[in-house]
Image (tube, rainbow, N blue to C red):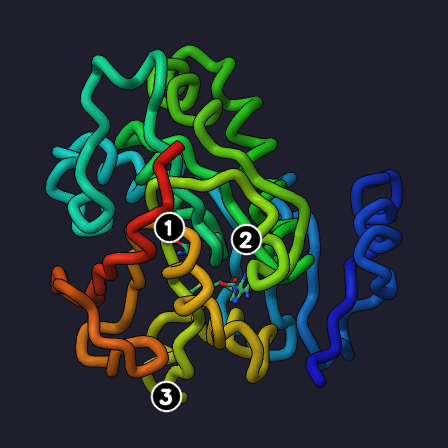
Amino acid sequence: MTTLAIQYEPGNAASEALAQRLNLPLIRSIGQHQGLLLSYQHNRLTLSQPMARDAGSVSVDFCDSRLTFRLAQALSREAVVKAVGGCVPKTLLTESAPRLIDATAGLGQDAFILAAAGWEVTMLEQSPVIHALLEDGLQRARIAASAPQHQRFLQKILPRLHLLAPGDSLAVLPTLPRASVIYLDPMFPAREKAARVKKNRFLLQYLHGDQGAGDGLLPLALSLAAKVVVKRPRLARPLEELQPAASLTGKTSRFDIYVGHPDQSTA
Ligand SMILES: C[S@@+](CC[C@H](N)C(=O)[O-])C[C@H]1O[C@@H](n2cnc3c(N)ncnc32)[C@H](O)[C@@H]1O
């Protein structure tokens, strides 16, 4: 079991509130802490492993230059956007943008790109820790949205991102209004070497242990939406060994596209 704690910072009420909410210990001295740590670094909630500095750190930053660079390119060429059905035409944006449920929201990167492409995205995340990182990133993005240099893109995207309370999508999905697409990107058990290369993935794997592989999500999603898209490593076997109707392969990932229950009307 991974030990997880929150760094105590005198005068920072947020760390105390978070410890209470997540029911985690607050520690003053991180010197000997062997496990994972949540701390506010430069005002940003960050997950790290202080005794293993090469493990890197994880936080959510929707103003990150790599993400804004992706937004500046043609979003219609993003594989995840193509896989769900493309950018939403301008005529639909104001009245009835199609809805998509990201049932494995993680750090919200795919959800953000999809919202930028015009989709109304509902995000579900089971891990209270990942959820806290994502919520913190959204909050900082809302503040940044009021700064002139970010105004245009963040002010359009953020209202289309809806993060629900932490919960298991297996339980929550059936309770939600129907969406045009359900998107799944469950954890993939990474080889140690590959995980070390992608540092943040390593921390997330460590945090989740054997959980988070998305067992049972695909059959459920297929019963609830007309279209389901699953992100997989490029060469991985299909989720639950279910063969997709089509696949889009990118540089590192593959997007498997499934036809779900035909009776599910879009909302
Ligand atoms: C690989 S990450 C998703 C990354 C995300 N697509 C992004 O762009 O940042 C997978 C996430 O799915 C979540 N997850 C797995 N099974 C879930 C379930 N049944 N319900 C909700 N979340 C789940 C895990 O907790 C993990 O945070």
Query: Along the polypeptide, which appears first: circle 1 or circle 3?
Result: 3
Q: Residue 169: x and y, percent?
A: 56, 59
Left or right: 48 as drawn, with respect to 78: right
Mark 1 and mark 2: Cα distance apart in space: 10 Å
Question: Is residue 179 depicted above or below 149 in this figure?
Answer: below
Which residue is at a point 50% across and 23% down the rendered structure image? 144
User: Dot 1: what SS?
Assistant: loop
User: What is the CA distance from the residue labelled 1 to the residue labelled 3?
Assistant: 32 Å
Q: Is residue 20 left or right of residue 247?
A: right
Q: Amino acid at mark 3?
A: Arg
Q: Which residue is mark 3?
A: 191
Label 2: element kind: helix
**Circle 3 SS class:** loop
Query: Which three-letter amino acid code belongs to the residue tagged 2?
Result: Leu
Proximity of marks 1 and 2: CB atoms separated by less than 8 Å: no
Q: Nearer the viewer, residue 211 or 60?
A: 211
Q: Nearer the viewer, mark 3 or mark 2?
A: 2
Residue at mark 2: 173
Residue identified by numbered label 1: 225
Q: Which mark is residue 58?
A: none
Q: Residue at x 19, y 42 (%)?
A: 85
